[in-house]
Image: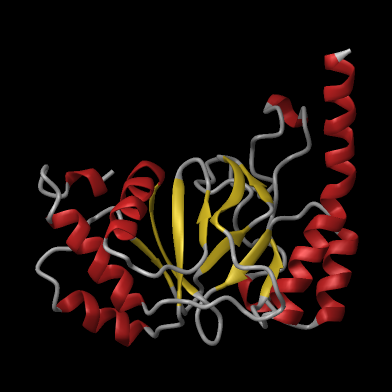
Amino acid sequence: MREILGRRRRLLFRRKRGPVQLRAALTYAAEWQWPVLPGVGLKAAGSRGDRGRGCACPDPECVVPGAHPFDPGILAATTDEQMVRWWWTNRPTAPIVLATGGRAPCAVSLPAVAGARALSALDRMDMRLGPVVATPTRWSLLVAPYTLEQLGELLFVKDCVPSSLRFHGEGGGYLVLPPAEAGTGQVRWERAPLPGSAAPWLPDVEAVVDALVEASTSAPDGGSRLAY
């Protein structure tokens, strides 16, 4: 009986994924004015014997399976409600890809284990954070938009920055938003945006990087806990 109920729940979840993806994409694009586009997604289950975990793009060595733009490319990202509806009506389970930079949020990401520890350290520092996107391998802290010049100046004055940090900004940067499934697993909110129509508040990148560097360098192990 439990197995039957479990199958019914999985089938119901699959049926809901399409509308859920569309509603989320419309929230990001139409309500929050975040430019989005559909990601490439994963191969169908059983395709070429990869059990559905391989990327649907032509690259057999894809390092971000399912979690990147392909067709259309990143420059097609839009906030147009009609275009978003068309995309996700035709590809109801496609991942939602945010084109970072410009007026859209940027992000700072780090490996999942280090991310969990870093968030705990930032909470102890009473650091106000915005939404945090989590996958089984990396956590991404959304930050206010910044330019490449701002980022360069910020990093230039630092004595040390954890090598595990990645920056998703303008100039072709992107980030997969929940709900989605990538080759590494489910994409979810570790810190979800507060409910409502207003776009989420975002901290400045300077504050986040300063806090991450402080949390790293003040650690008993000299910061290696962030260098995963």
Q: Residue at x 64, y 64 (%)?
A: 97
Q: Please state if 107 lies on the left or on the right of 77 as rendered.
A: left
Of the pair 116 and 170, the residue shown nearer to us: 116
Of the pair 153 and 127, the residue shown nearer to us: 127
**Relative image position of residue 15 (x, y in whole percent):** 90, 44
Q: Residue at x 15, y 49 (%)?
A: 219
Which residue in the rendered view is the most extreme toward the top? Answer: 1
**Relative image position of residue 119 (x, y in whole percent):** 36, 54
The quarter of the picture where the C terminus appears is: top left
Q: Please state if 77 lies on the left or on the right of 200 as rendered.
A: right
198 w.r.t. 120: above or below: below
28 w.r.t. 103: above or below: above
Q: Please state if 45 lies on the left or on the right of 101 as rendered.
A: right
Q: How many marks?
A: 0
The quarter of the picture where the N terminus appears is: top right
Q: Picture quarter containing residue 165?
A: bottom left
**Which color scheme does this rendered protein use?**
secondary structure
167 w.r.t. 189: above or below: below
Q: Picture quarter containing residue 23?
A: bottom right
Of the pair 140 and 164, the residue shown nearer to us: 140
**Relative image position of residue 5 (x, y in whole percent):** 88, 22
Q: Residue at x 60, y 58 (%)?
A: 68
**Relative image position of residue 37 (x, y in whole percent):** 70, 69
